[in-house]
Amino acid sequence: MIRLSLRTLPLFAIIIGLAMALAAFMTISGVSTAYRDLIRSRMAMVAQDIANDINSALALGLRLPEQMTLPALLSRQATADPLTMSIDVSDVDGVVLFSSSPTRAGHPDGRADDKQAFRFDQPLINDFGAPVGNVAIRFDGAAVARGLATIRAAAVQDALPIGLAAVLAGSFGCFLVLRHLLARARAVVETRSEANPFARANAVLDQLHQGDTAMDHLR
């Protein structure tokens, strides 16, 4: 029994551990995706609010470069979220017209090379369906990555004791199953031995032999 358990239980423990690791990976992946989606939804709401204000001014005949109230609006929106690096409004050529960070105004948006930012872009479309510009929400990519790392670490920390408990419980359950199966196997073997006449004869001869041996010792 001990030898069989030593051979079988480690295999079951490995299988259970792999299953728990896969479950933890799926959980961490799902939580990370949900975190990114939550951030994007916040960025989308801010970008849509700004786009609505711009489109309202466009409908009144005020062209995008003439909307001089935008810098104050962008600054208010940017200070509302500590993750925000800048909020930019650019024209169709990709040049920043207005920004919550004044140093970015007048320069190319640089979307392709903006590796340090976690971005969300909201195209600006006028009433005729023509593009007039873009609203870019730029979050601090390093801060977003730190938030993801914190969430993943917390998920791993929660998963470790659960996984260990699952391995121990599964191994103990496997041990009980093996013990039950071994008892059943022994019972079947004993039943077959009792039903076999040759086995019964051998058992009687063994008893007689043991009795003769005991008498010889007494003599």
Image: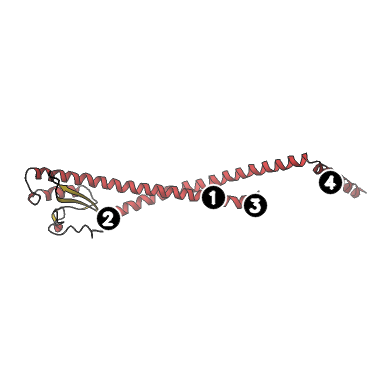
Q: Secondary structure at mark 2?
A: helix
Compare marks 4 and 3 and give the one earlier in the sequence. 3
Compare marks 4 and 2 and give the one earlier in the sequence. 2
User: Local crowd at mark 1 within 10 Å, few (<14), some, or many (≥20)?
Assistant: many
- State how far apart marks 4 and 1 are (Cα): 44 Å
- State how far apart marks 3 and 2 are (Cα): 55 Å
Amino acid bearing label 1: Ala
- Residue 3 is labelled as 3
Compare marks 2 and 1 and give the one earlier in the sequence. 1
Say whether marks 4 and 1 touch (CB < 8 Å).
Answer: no
Query: Could you say where residue 75 lies in the image, as x and y percent from the top left?
Result: 15, 50
Q: Residue at x 49, y 51 (%)?
A: 18
- Residue 206 is labelled as 4
Q: Secondary structure at mark 4?
A: helix
- State how far apart marks 2 and 1 are (Cα): 40 Å
Nearer to me, 22 or 169: 22
- Residue 13 is labelled as 1
Amino acid bearing label 4: Asp
- Residue 141 is labelled as 2
